[in-house]
Amino acid sequence: MIQIEEVYKKYLSKRRRLRLFQRDFSKENNENSSTKTTIHYKKGLFIKRKTKITHALNGVNFRVKEGEIFGLLGPNGAGKTTLTKIISTLILPDKGSVKVNSFDTKNEPTPVRESIGLVTGGERSLYWKLTPIENLTFFGRLYRLSKKEAYNRAIQLIERFDLTEKKDELVQNLSTGQKMKVAFCRALIHNPPILLVDEAERGLDPRASKEFRAFIKEELQQKQGKTIVLCTHNMEILDELCDRIALINQGSIVALDTPEHLKIGIRKKHILTIQSQAAIPTNLFADLQQVKKIQSKQEEEFHFTEIEITNGGNLPNTILSRIYDEEITVNEFHLKSATLEDVFLKLTGRKITEEDELDD
C-alpha cells in the first residue's frame, strides 16, 4: 500500500545570532591638560549568520501492508513528521522513491492525495473562522465531490462523531477534542483508503483518547479496512493499536517488527518499584543473582526503590519478604515489564522523550 525505498531528506538552515558588543575608546590628552584621559563608551549589535545542514532522513526503507495499522515511533525531531509530509506529497525527498497506492508521489501527486487522508496535531488543518459543516463541505469540494455529495458526506461524518450540536458553531470555539474530531472528519471526507495520523492524540483528555483508539482500531481498520500510519512518541497507543512498528532515530529506521517481537529481547526484564517509609538496604539482595540494578531516591517522607530483575517468577515475593523481615513499612509496590521505551533505549542508548535539533 505504501512503499518507501532509500529515502533521504536534508534541510539547510541559516541561523542568525545577535550578540551585544561593547567597545571602549581611550584618548590621551596632552600633558598640559588637567584631564589626561577621556573615555568614550559605545554599544551595538553584532550579527553572525551560520548555515547548518540537518539530515532529516537517511536511507529510510519500509513497506506498509494493506489494511494494517503501522506505527512510527521516535523522539521529537527524529524525522517522523518529515516522512509523513513526504508520503502526503507536501514535500519531496532529495533521493529515493515513495509509492502510495501504486502511485509515485513525485510523478503522480494528484492520485496520491486522493488516496490519503491526513490528520495532524494542533488543529492546523482547519479554518477556525468557519463552522465544521462549512469546513467539511469546502474540503469535500476540493476533492471534486459535488456540492450535494460533499454536504451529505459531511453530515454523515458529523453524526458519526457526535458533533451534530456543534456543526454550526465556529471551529475556534470548540474544545480540543471536538476540533480533533472535525480534523478526522476532514481527513475522511473523500473516503480515502489510507489515513496518516501525525500526533493527533496530543491534547486529548483520557476519555477522548480512549474514543480515539477505539475509533482507529474498531471502525477504521476492522470495519472499513483502511490502512493507517500512526506517527507519535506515545508508546502506549502504538503498543495497543499497531500491527507493526518502526523505531526511527535521527532519520534512520533502527528496528521494524510487531510490538511483541520488538520486546522479545528484553521481555525478561522487569522493574519492581517500591514505596516505603524507610530506606531499603541494598545489601539485602546481594545474594540474588537475578537482581541486576538497584536505584533509590527520597521524596519528602517517602523512599522510592527501583529494582531491576530478570525472570520475575517468585522473586518479587522474595524481595518483599526480606523487606518485611527488616520491619520496613511498604506503602505500595508494582511490577513493570519491558516497554517500547526499553527497546528504544537498548537500541539507541537514548530515551524517546529526548529531542533532536530538527523540529518534527
Image: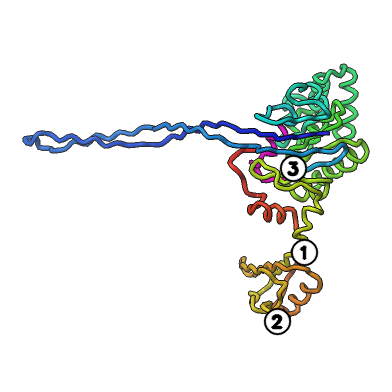
Query: What stretch of residues is rendered in magenta?
Result: 72-85
Q: Nearer the viewer, residue 317 or 183?
A: 317
Most foreground residue, 194 or 62: 62
Res 358 quadrant in image: top right
Magenta span includes 80: yes
| Placement of 258 over or under 46, stated as above or below | below
Label drawn at residue 72: 3
Residue at the image point whose x is 64% and y is 67% from the top: 295
Write down the residue under mark 2.
327
Q: Which residue is mark 1?
A: 268
Q: Amino acid at mark 1?
A: Lys
Contact flag, marks 3 and 1 (Cβ < 8 Å):
no
**232 above or below 106?**
below
Amino acid of disc 3: Leu
Write the residue at 84% across / 18% down. 144
Q: Estimate the x, y position of residue 1 in percent, counting from the top left.
A: 84, 33
